[in-house]
Amino acid sequence: MSRYSGIRCGIQIEAKMARATRWTEEKIKALKLPAGKAEQRVLVEPGLYLYLRQRTGGDVAKQWQFRAQVDGIRRWLSLGAFPAIGLAKANAELLMHRTAHESAKKGEADHPVIAARFARKAAKAQPTVAEVFAEWLADKRMGSARKGGIPVRERTINVLIENFDLDIRNRIGDAKIAKLAREGVQACIDAPRKRGAPGAAAHVFRTLRGLTTFAIKRGHIDGADPMRGIENLRPYRPAPVNAASDAELLALLRFVDESKLWEATKLAIEFQLLTGARPSEVRLLTWDEVNMTRAQWTIPAEKFKSGREHRVHLSKQALSIIDRAKVIRGASPYVFPGANAGDKKPAAALEKMAVARALSRIAERTKDEGGKKLRPHDLRRTFRTMLSRIGVAQHVAELCLGHIETETMR
């Protein structure tokens, strides 16, 4: 007997056996393994079997299987477990696979077993949440459409990494992003809320929102948005602006003058109050950025937060600060050098925490005289509130800080 004849005969026998028993959901549910057997395949329809296997706990697992011949070799394709997949659904799956099987014989499609194998490989190749997160960061470093093609600052990247490592990676980092469920996303957002950190929860929400949006655009998620319907129930509300009043400012400046702080530190504090610049921009100010003739300070794009050049007008008081800084200049390229400015080697810029430590010490001594504890960035906030107090228009005040609103960029 040829191989073809044997297969045909086997199919005919299967058909007769299947017709001998009229299967129903109740019969399948009541089906048990014969005594002494740990597994068994039961024919339900030609090509459709119910595979019974005894679990460790003693109960019996039931799974639908489709039998097919691939290159003369018998193959089994799982169609799902019973009762999650009922008899009607299993028969529908059987019909679909039979149709695919016939198409495969004619060379019009892949064999269903081979197609299933490819599907499993594709599922394994699907990226995880952590892998897509790394891809997202790499894309941000290449350029952001929101910033006109300019790469996102490394500081922003570090904040995203911190949020991901703290509340996201251990929960859903290894999950396939294509199968990301709403429950997993919500668990990441709820974690910081449970430890009493609503601000961190808001950052996690924003990180996940950006990540899933990127995944959808790149085709990693082709189903429903896993964040649809999720809201940040306790959004981050920043603390009130900490800016000094006129009286508090006078107390601060008086104690700065009377203190034994390094001269460059004193000048940096006053210069920031006069210009509204960021602490890092003042600390790293170099002589070649200052044009005394035009009374102008040009902050290079690489030093400015928005990644573009920014020009600051220098008032007479600000120019006097620059003149006083020339006395301690030495060989340093920085206007406000560190404490080793008298050495022969060029002095580095002020230490990153020099102004912060100075403001902290002064605040402790000025409390009784109306002083206020300020941080370096609070000097910039004080500059902004002073502009409002003297009647400067809001859009002009924002331009002084280097903030450009979208309405003004037309």
Image (cartoon, grey):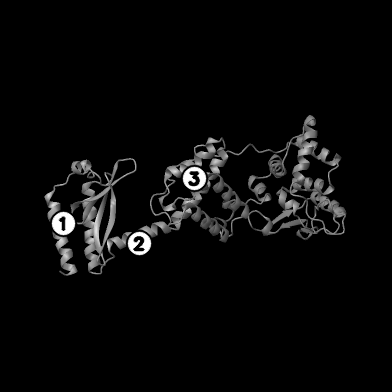
Give the left or right position of residue 224, taking residue 285 as reference. left
Q: Are marks 3 and 1 in contact (CB under 8 Å)?
A: no
Instruction: Give the side of residue 43 with respect to residue 277, left or right.
Output: left
The residue carrying pointer 2 sits among few (fewer than 14), some (14 to 19) or many (20 or more) residues within 10 Å by Cα, namely few
* Amino acid at pointer 1: Glu
* Residue with the mark numbered 2: 118
Do residues under tags 1 and 2 come within 8 Å of each other at their CB atoms? Answer: no
Q: Kindly identify the residue that appears in the image at 38 percent across and 60 percent down.
A: 121
Residue 304 point in image, percent of width and height: 67, 55
Amino acid found under the numbered disc labelled 3: Arg
Distance between the alpha carbons at the discs numbered 3 and 1: 48 Å
Q: In what element is the residue under mark 2? A: helix
Q: Residues within 10 Å of mark 3 (few under 14, many from 20)?
A: some
Q: Residue at x 14, y 62 (%)?
A: 9
Secondary structure beneath label 1: helix
> What secondary structure is marked by label 3?
helix
Kindly report the distance in space between the C-alpha atoms of the residues bearing marks 1 and 2. 29 Å
The residue labelled by disc 3 is: 171
Left or right: residue 324 versus residue 149 is right
Task: First in sequence, mark 3 or 1: give its number.
Answer: 1
Query: Which residue is the site of mark 1?
Result: 14
Residue 404 visible at all:
no
Image quarter for residue 251?
Answer: top right
Q: CA distance from mark 2 to mark 3?
A: 29 Å
Query: As displayed, is residue 393 above or below residue 120?
Result: above
Q: How many neighbours does mark 1 have within 10 angstroms: few (below 14), some (14-19), or many (20 or more)?
A: some
